[in-house]
């Protein structure tokens, strides 16, 4: 059956503009996203036309400067937009989050000339971005990446190597790529903006995944890809710091998407439990299920409060890395628990593709892995609390 349209969440929004924005997103979600989500995920179709619509509606550049085509929205608002989109279809919410992540390096570390040249098309010109950090041999240990960029006379760089687990790999219009330009370790990495149609750039067949089948995830190969030095972002050797800065914000995007997915599962569970009759009354009358629903709702609300607390720190220009890691950890664990419980509440029907909760459960799993596994999040949090590990 088609996915239900997301149920309105009672949100605290800072401005009338933000309230209008959420209303627009809900309208798009109800009309364009939710009705097609189940069919397109089952068929493994990526909704590229929908991303064009989102770009035209100003939703692909929300947290960035309006003078370059962005929406100039605080993270507190942007993340709630992501939550609404992910509640309708995770492929869409996560896709917008990844696109924003891909724009971060240029928007924060690029020169004014670079920003004026590239950002307008990236933020509102219909382009779609991807982020190239992980590699086949370096996932959590990202500082050991092997993709190399070699400087040549005339100011060009030649990039060779392979990126792995790339969301939008093979269909992106641009890639923010971390490549080694110096020695081993974090200080030898530099960031580059690579066009998707660059000669020598190719993608492998998309990975066959447990969930999110509509979102292509693929290895991307760089076989002597030549780019101008004008596409180097930041200083040589600054790339790893740029990557970590992007990931702090990206983790909040994942947290918001996780809560959107969990909210969709909770809504489905409530609707089923109040409609399904057993022993002459709705199953929602039974205390065991009522307590499950109460726990699920509490996890969702706690996760929403946590990611918004981190977002407000970010908006205020205060350190937010610890809270971002906490939000990513809690919200994605909550999504896994809530979606699993939703399957349980629907019983045998929950285990069938006739209802969306089995898909939600499969999709929730990846959120505990991407943009830093939850084990890495615990390491980040502990480092803030007790300092770096002694060696």
Image: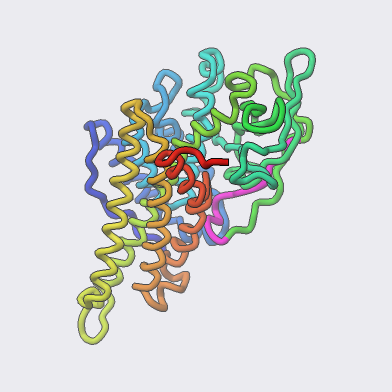
Q: Percent x, y for residue 57?
A: 40, 34
Name which residue lies at 51% across and 30% down: 103
Scheme of colours in the image: rainbow
Eyeballing the image, is 284 above or below 245? Answer: below
- Quarter of the image with the N terminus is bottom left
User: How many labels were placed on the picture?
Assistant: 0
Residue 325 seen from this side: yes
Q: Residue furthest bottom?
A: 279
- Quarter of the image with the C terminus is top right
Question: Magenta segment: does it hold 214?
Answer: yes
Name which residue lies at 59% across and 31% down: 176
Eyeballing the image, is 337 above or below 194? Answer: below
Eyeballing the image, is 164 above or below 318? Answer: below
Q: In the figure, is residue 343 to the left or right of 239?
A: left
In terms of image quadrants, where is residue 230?
Answer: top right
Name which residue lies at 42% across and 36% down: 321
In terms of image quadrants, where is residue 271?
Answer: bottom left
Numbered range of the magenta stretch: 210-222
Q: Percent x, y for residue 95?
A: 50, 43
Q: Percent x, y for residue 10?
A: 22, 48
Q: Nearer the viewer, residue 78 or 370?
A: 370
Q: In the figure, is residue 316 to the left or right of 138?
A: left
Q: Nearer the viewer, residue 369 or 263?
A: 369
In terms of image quadrants, where is residue 349?
Answer: bottom left
Name which residue lies at 26% across and 51% down: 8
Q: Nearer the viewer, residue 172 or 347?
A: 347
Q: In the figure, is residue 284 to the left or right of 83?
A: left
């Amino acid at each position: 059956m088609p996915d239900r349209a997301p149920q309105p969440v009672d949100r605290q929004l800072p401005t009338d503009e933000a309230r209008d924005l959420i209303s627009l997103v809900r309208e798009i979600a109800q009309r364009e996203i939710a009705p097609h989500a189940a069919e397109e995920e089952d068929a493994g179709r990526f909704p590229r036309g929908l991303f064009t619509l989102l770009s035209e509606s100003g939703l692909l550049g929300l947290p960035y400067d309006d003078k370059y085509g962005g929406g100039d929205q605080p993270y507190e608002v942007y993340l709630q937009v992501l939550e609404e989109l992910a509640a309708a279809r995770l492929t869409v919410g996560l896709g917008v989050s990844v696109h924003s992540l891909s724009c971060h390096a240029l928007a924060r570390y690029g020169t004014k000339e670079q920003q004026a040249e590239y950002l307008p098309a990236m933020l509102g010109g219909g382009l779609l971005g991807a982020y190239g950090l992980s590699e086949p041999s370096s996932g959590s240990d990202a500082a050991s990446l092997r993709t190399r960029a070699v400087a040549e006379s005339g100011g060009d760089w030649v990039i060779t190597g392979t990126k792995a687990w790339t969301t939008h790999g093979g269909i992106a219009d641009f890639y923010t790529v971390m490549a080694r330009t110096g020695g081993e370790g974090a200080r030898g990495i530099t960031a580059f903006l690579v066009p998707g149609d660059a000669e020598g750039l190719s993608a492998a067949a998309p990975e066959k995944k447990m969930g999110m089948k509509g979102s292509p995830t693929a290895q991307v190969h760089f076989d002597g890809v030549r780019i101008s030095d004008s596409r180097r972002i930041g200083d040589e050797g600054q790339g790893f710091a740029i990557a970590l800065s992007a990931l702090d914000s990206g983790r909040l995007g994942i947290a918001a998407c996780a809560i959107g997915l969990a909210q969709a599962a909770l809504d489905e569970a409530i609707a089923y439990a109040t409609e399904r009759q057993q022993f002459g009354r709705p199953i929602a009358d039974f205390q065991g299920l009522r307590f499950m629903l109460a726990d699920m709702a509490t996890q969702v609300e706690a996760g929403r409060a946590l990611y918004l607390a981190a977002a407000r720190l970010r908006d205020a220009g205060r350190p937010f890395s610890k809270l971002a890691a906490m939000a990513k950890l809690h919200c994605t664990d909550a999504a896994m628990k809530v979606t699993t419980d939703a399957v349980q509440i629907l019983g045998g029907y929950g285990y069938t593709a006739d209802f969306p909760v089995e898909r939600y459960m499969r999709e929730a799993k990846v959120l505990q892995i991407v943009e830093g596994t939850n084990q890495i999040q615990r390491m980040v949090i502990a480092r803030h609390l007790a300092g770096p590990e002694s060696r």
